[in-house]
Image (cartoon, helix red, strand yellow):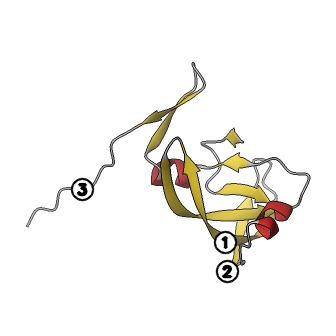
Amino acid sequence: MTVDTGATLTKIPRWLSVELGLVPEGTVQVRFGDGRLIDREVASAALRCEGRERIVAVAICEDPEPLVLGATTLEALAFSVDPVNELLVPTAVYELLATA
């Protein structure tokens, strides 16, 4: 799976969504780098990476497209990317301190 910090959602091919029994929950509009817009079905899926697991939204693509690990999944699993060493780096989860 390719990690793409410029992609919002994780993308999996239709054959895999069928094999996993995922049920499309709706569609989202996706914008490509060249400006094209398309609609993609989305579903919720449990993703596991390096011992961390979360339920995340995934975009369902046509079968010949590559799998992509997107930014929202990286955030949900609390990973950042080390592009020099091509590694996922565990991070802390941040929240805003509420002040009254």
The quadrant of the picture occupied by the C terminus is bottom left
Q: Earlier in the sequence, mark 3 or mark 2?
A: 2
Q: Is residue 36 above or below residue 91?
A: below
Question: Amino acid under label 2?
Answer: Glu
> Which residue is label 1 attached to?
43
The amino acid sitting under disc 3 is Leu
Question: Could you classify mark 3 by the number of other residues whose Cα lies within 10 Å: few (under 14), some (14-19), or many (20 or more)?
Answer: few
Q: Residue at x 60, y 25 (%)?
A: 86
Mark 2: few, some, or many residues within 10 Å (few <14, many ≥20)?
few
Task: Using the rendered view, name the quadrant where residue 61 is placed.
Answer: bottom right
Marks 3/1: CA distance?
Answer: 29 Å
Q: Which mark is residue 25?
A: 2
Tell whether 20 sits left or right of 63: left
Foreground pick, 86 / 51: 51
Quarter location, residue 18: bottom right
Q: Is residue 1 left or right of residue 71?
A: right
